[in-house]
Amino acid sequence: MSESFEELEARYRAALNRVGKAYRALHEAMGDPTPIPPGEEPPLLSKTERDAQTEAMQALQEYVPLRDLYWATRWGREGNPPQS
């Protein structure tokens, strides 16, 4: 049996919330990104920073295909193609 639209929407919302939480944690761990001046070494990353980066990447990798599936299904279901 295939997934209902409501189940897909619930998975999409959960994935979107995970991305938001992961990126907030990443920002808290690392602060705002700044360019590395020429001639300087990249900063060392703590385990907390590396773990936050990994979680943000994994959350986004899970989210993107769900986002595409959700919106393709929703547009097809509602007859509401994207405007741009």
Image: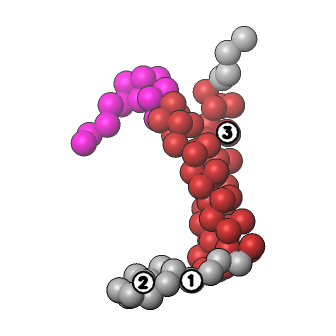
Instruction: Please report the residue visible at 49 percent of the width from the left and 26 percent of the height from the top.
Output: 73
- Say which element carries label 3: helix
Crowd class of label 1 (few under 14; some 14 to 19; many from 20; radius 10 Å):
few
Residue flagged by tag 3: what amino acid is it? Arg
In the rendered image, the vertical position of residue 63 relative to residue 68, given as above or below = below
Give the percent coordinates (x, y) of residue 84.
24, 42
- State how far apart marks 3 and 2 are (Cα): 38 Å
Asked whether 81 falls inside the magenta stretch, the response is yes
Q: Determine contact: label 1, label 3, CB under 8 Å.
A: no
- Residue drawn at 59 percent across, 55 percent down: 57
Where disc 2 sits, the SS reads loop
Tell me how far mark 1 sits from mark 3, CA to CA. 36 Å
CB contact under 8 Å: marks 3 and 2? no
Q: Residue under label 2, please give it.
A: 36
Locate residue 19, reporting x and y percent: 61, 57
User: Badge 1 is on which residue?
Assistant: 43
Question: 47 or 4, which is in the foreground?
Answer: 47
**Comes first in the chain, label 1 or label 3:** 3
Q: Quadrant of residue 80?
A: top left
Alpha-carbon distance for marks 1 and 2? 8 Å
* Residue 11 circle label: 3
Q: State the residue in front, 6 or 44.
A: 44
Q: Position of residue 25 (x, y in %)?
A: 67, 72
Eye-nearest disc, 3 or 2? 2
Amino acid at the residue labelled 1: Pro
Judged from the image, the secondary structure of the residue bearing numbered disc 1 is loop
Q: Are marks 1 and 2 in contact (CB under 8 Å)?
A: yes
Total marks shown come to 3
Residue 78 visible in the picture? no
Pick the front one: 7 or 32? 32
Mark 1 against mark 3, which lies toward the viewer? 1
Residue range of the region highlighted in magenta in the rendering: 71-84
